Structure formats: C-alpha cells, structure tokens
Image: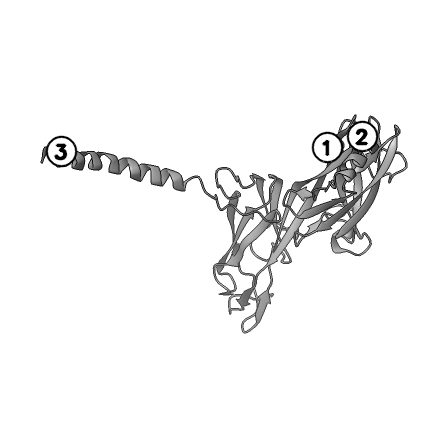
C-alpha cells in the first residue's frame, strides 16, 4: 500500500508540470499575423446616417498598417464636403488628423500592425424645410512608404558550368521576393550569369505595379493638376538599386538605374518598366551567389466614402 501511495503522489506532483509543458508548446506555433498592401481603411462611417439640419453628427475613421514597413507621416483628411457648412470653420480644405507613424505588424511576436481611430464631431448643414440631400463625405489617408525587393543571382565560370553539365546538374534561380506594401516589384534576369572576361554585362528587368487600391501622389504635388488626373498622368517613385560587391551598373542601361536613388514615374499611376545593365567587374574563381536589391520610396494615398442624409428643418435654410 505504501508503494501505491508513493506512485499516486508522484503522479500528482508531475501533472502540473505536464500542463505547463503543453501550454508552453502551444506558443511556438504560427503567430497568425497576416500582411497586406500598406495602410487600409477598416472603417469610415457616421454615427447617424440621417440627421436634421443643425444636429450633431460624428464621422469615425479606423485605419491599420498591414504592410511590412512602418508608415511615416500618416495624415487623414475629410474631402468632398465643405467643412464650413458642417460647423467646423476649417474651410474647403477640410480638417486634418495627423497620426505620425503607424508601426508594421511584427511576425515574430504575432503583433498585428498598428491601428488608429479618430472621430470628427460635425454639425449637419442648414437646408430649407422639406428639403433632403444625401452628402457623401470622403476621407483621404496619405502616408510615406518603402517597398524592398530581393533577387538572388548566381555568377559561375565557364569551366564550372561545363563541369555541372557533364554531371547532369543545373543551376536554378530563385524568384523575386518583396516586402508587402502598395507597390509590388518584380526583378527578372537569367537563372545564372556565365562569367569570363572582365566587364561582362547582363540585363535585369524591373517591373513595378500599384496593387494597393490607391494612388502614388502625382509629381505636380498634393494639390496640383495631377491630383485630379487632368494634365499630369505620372506618379513619382524614388528607386535605389543595390548590387553585390563584384558588380556595378553599366552606363549603357537606363538613366533611371541608380545606386544612389533616381526618380521614376508610374504611367497613369499604375506601372513602370525599367531595364538596367549590370557589369561583372570581378568574376569569382568558381561560382558565387549574390543578391540584387531594389528599394522604392514614395508617398501614397487611399480613399473611402460614406453617406449622410440631411433633412432640412424650419429653423434651417439658406436665407
């Protein structure tokens, strides 16, 4: 009987430790953090969809950074309604809210991207009694962002390549990977570069696409003609290329190719295609893998719209 009592006590002693181990094991799995295309507007709505002239109405905005990079200089602004009419006194340009920096999601800790919420407290504009009008207030969120892409490249000598072929082996290239954000980057080149003489050159093709559902701020400026898409159909992005130590950019490539930053333009704010030529200045003795990196810096904006019905009252009116 004493032996059985001892065994039972040992089981009771070890049971809590087993529970701790099971709980600890659950924390080492998938963090569940998902990434998206930069800042998203997760909510834009009034507290009342129908109000009478002179009544208070609140407009609530919710935003979140879902991309891989921190969003800098985040500003939200109401547009499409005259803010003077809504009792704010801020004029046609509307009332701005400055959020500063919104931090990106943290994959290691499982922390989602930073969220922010703000409310504009307005007053419904005056309308004559019996009149109704459906206003469509919009919010525009602008921010500075960076997108980075990496493409592995293999340099291999002619002798090493022949040896691999004789053994039935091949060199396969890896695809481009880029950090999630409003713009995507694709870098295309061959699976490998066969080196021989010094200053051998090969092309790389860079394709940039706007996938964020918004727009890069036009080159004519925040309030220039390009904002409305009338005269300026270009959207500027600063592109910087970083190459492995053995390589450099050739002068025979596009003038937009630069290791110190050069402004490129997205045609109609959507796409850009650039071909650069790269020189192999110092070929490896056998073979070597390096990384071609492209970084984009730009200012981006995204919009959302809602509706508020205003009903005119006897006290209201234009006269």
Q: Are marks 2 and 1 in contact (CB under 8 Å)?
A: yes
Lower position in the chain sequence, tag 3 or tag 2: 3
Mark 3 surroundings: few (<14), some (14-19) or many (≥20) residues within 10 A: few
What residue is rendered at 50% in x and 48% in y?
117
Q: Which residue is tagged 3?
A: 3
Q: Can see residue 88?
A: no
Q: Which mark is residue 247?
A: 2
Numbered tag placed on residue 249 in the rendering:
none
Q: Are marks 3 and 2 in contact (CB under 8 Å)?
A: no
- Mark 1, residue position: 290
Residue 19 in the image: x percent, y percent? Answer: 30, 40
Query: Looking at the picture, how far across and down is residue 98, in whole percent?
Result: 58, 42
**Residue 22 appears in view:** yes
What crowding class fits label 2: few (fewer than 14 Cα within 10 Å), some (14-19), or many (20 or more)?
some
In 3D space, how far apart are the residues under numbered discs 1 and 3 (Cα atoms)? 66 Å
The crowd level at tag 1 (other Cα within 10 Å; few <14, some 14-19, many 20+) is some
């Amino acid at each position: 009987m004493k032996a059985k009592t001892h065994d039972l006590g040992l089981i009771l002693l070890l049971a809590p430790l087993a529970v701790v181990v099971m709980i600890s094991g659950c924390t080492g799995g998938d963090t569940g953090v998902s990434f998206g295309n930069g800042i998203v507007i997760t909510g834009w709505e009034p507290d009342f969809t129908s109000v009478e002239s002179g009544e208070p109405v609140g407009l609530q905005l919710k935003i979140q950074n879902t991309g891989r990079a921190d969003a800098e200089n985040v500003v939200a602004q109401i547009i499409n309604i005259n803010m003077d009419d809504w009792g704010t006194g801020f004029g046609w340009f509307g009332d701005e809210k400055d959020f500063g920096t919104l931090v990106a999601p943290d994959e290691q800790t499982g922390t989602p991207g930073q969220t922010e919420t703000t409310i504009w407290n307005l007053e419904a504009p005056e309308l004559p009694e019996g009149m109704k009008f459906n206003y469509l207030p919009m919010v525009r969120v602008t921010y500075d962002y960076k997108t980075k892409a990496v493409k592995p490249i293999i340099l291999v000598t002619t002798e090493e390549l022949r040896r691999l072929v004789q053994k039935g082996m091949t060199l396969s290239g890896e695809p481009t990977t880029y950090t999630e954000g409003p713009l995507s980057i694709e870098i295309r080149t061959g699976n490998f570069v066969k080196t021989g003489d010094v200053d051998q050159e090969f092309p790389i093709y860079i394709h940039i696409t706007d996938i964020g559902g918004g727009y890069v701020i036009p080159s004519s400026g925040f309030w220039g003609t390009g904002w409305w898409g009338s005269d300026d159909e270009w959207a500027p992005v600063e592109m910087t290329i970083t190459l492995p130590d053995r390589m450099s950019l050739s002068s025979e490539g596009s003038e937009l190719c630069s290791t110190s930053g050069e402004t490129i333009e997205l045609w109609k704010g959507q796409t850009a295609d650039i071909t650069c030529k790269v020189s192999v200045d110092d070929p490896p003795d056998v073979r070597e893998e390096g990384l071609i990196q492209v970084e984009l810096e730009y200012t981006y904006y995204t919009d959302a719209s809602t509706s508020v019905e205003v009903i005119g009252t006897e006290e209201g009116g234009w006269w």
